[in-house]
Image (cartoon, rainbow, N blue to C red):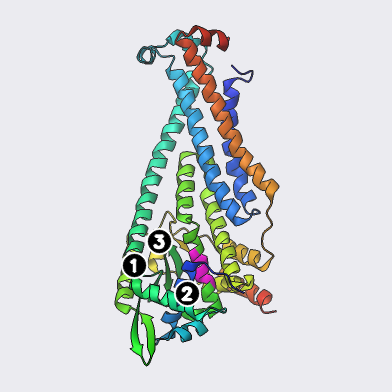
Amino acid sequence: MTRRARGALEAEVMGVLWTAGEPLTPDQVRRRLPGELAYTTVMTILVRLVDKGAVSRRQQGRGYEYEPRLDQAGLAAERMRSMLEAEGDRAGVLSRFVEGLDASSAAALRRALRGRTGS
Amino acid sequence: MTAVPVEAWVALTLASSVVFGVSAPAVSRFLPPRSAVWLLSTGSLLLAGSAAVVLGLVVLSVAGGLAPIATVGHWSAQRVAANEPFDPATAVVAGLLLAAGTLRAGVVSWGTLRRVLAAWSAARGCPGPLVVLPDPEPLAFAVPGWPGRIVASRGVLDACSPEERLAVLAHEQAHLDGRHDLHLVAVAVAAALDPALVALPRASRRAMERWADERAAKDAGDRRIVAAAIGRVAGADPPAWRLLTIPLGATDAEWRVRALLRHPPPRRIAATLVLASVGMVAAGASLVAGHDIVQVFEAAMGHPVAATLSGR
């Protein structure tokens, strides 16, 4: 059903760990991801994220539980924020998912979506 | 020398720039987004380059008729001036246009390069592919680099369903995988060099968003999920630093949603070829113009064969 780029899958696993609010086992991560992913695929990605320093793990029973490394995440967020504040991105180097809309256009957009996707 | 005068080739090159600059933004809306992005960046480089070359040729051919320059170049100022197709006033205008364009391209290149380097450096210092900002507003964007990073706020992660989250992350990953930062730089520099291409950066940005949407739709397996994610993120109050960005505006978000609620875009080979051929015409015409001007100089250098062949 889904066909993902490798980088997107890594980001997605991190997204799952961030929204969970608690440490997760590889199987819990797998079940929270859309689509049918193999356990080994999820495991490989978690190990890679631990190696990169983005995720930490701790022994839990016979296996491991994983969570985002908040120390690293805080530093990364500060780095990005100071870059954004210094550069402002007037040249549009960064591509935001949706650029700022005024409130009425956004409301119109959402109404259109409700009409078309609700069916 | 060709039967068509050199002025015609110069005019054709400059006219191609105007034709491309006016038509490409409109035509690119109907092309598959990936082709549109590539056509806009390669086309704009080709056209801006060709325009700069012919303006340079006009300046060079008139300057070559001036005695001090002819002495340095070891050709006859009289013979260049006798074959000279452009008058001094044209050369002055061409020279001013070229100088202004080069200056602007330099400033834009420097500014863009600085921002790209800052993004690359910020991306390098972050572990993992996803950086999460603790902001409640739904925000998501790609920070280019080697490798690039996706930045998303707590707001977007918490507001989206797992499928929508996949779509947002796949969209940003598509910007990184497609090296959209390099396309942006190419079009920005070309547009700074050639004022006829002023509308292309925005058209390119729009095509990039569509490219990323199509990639996300493929990853999510359902086009409507991407459309819903756009609706979810749209309309959030931008944080203060966002006031500095170039907003794409409501029409673009609506256009993206409408495109996603339709079928995937068809290939449109004819339109792609027509647009690509405008770039080819400009490049070809500038080469012929260059060849003609070089022949004028060769003749003035007193090579008997070249002088006979040029026939002027």
Residue B229, compared with residue B21, is above or below; it is below
Question: In which quarter of the view is residue A89 placed?
Answer: bottom left
Q: Which residue is mark 2?
A: A12
Check if residue B6 falls in the magenta segment.
no
User: Share a chain, discs 1 and 3?
Assistant: yes
CB within 8 Å, label 3 to label 2: no
The chain that hosts pointer 2 is A
Give the alpha-carbon distance from disc 2 to disc 1, as whole Å: 16 Å
Q: Position of residue B65 (x, y in %)?
A: 44, 14
Q: Residue at x 53, y 39 (%)?
A: B46
- Labelled disc at residue B126: 1
Q: Residue at x 52, y 24 (%)?
A: B290
User: Share a chain, discs 3 and 2?
Assistant: no
The chain that hosts pointer 3 is B
What residue range appears in magenta?
A: B167-173
Q: Which residue is mark 3?
A: B147
Q: Is residue A34 left or right of residue A25?
A: right
Say what secondary structure mark 3 lies in.
loop
Magenta span main SS: helix
Q: Residue at x 65, y 72 (%)?
A: A112
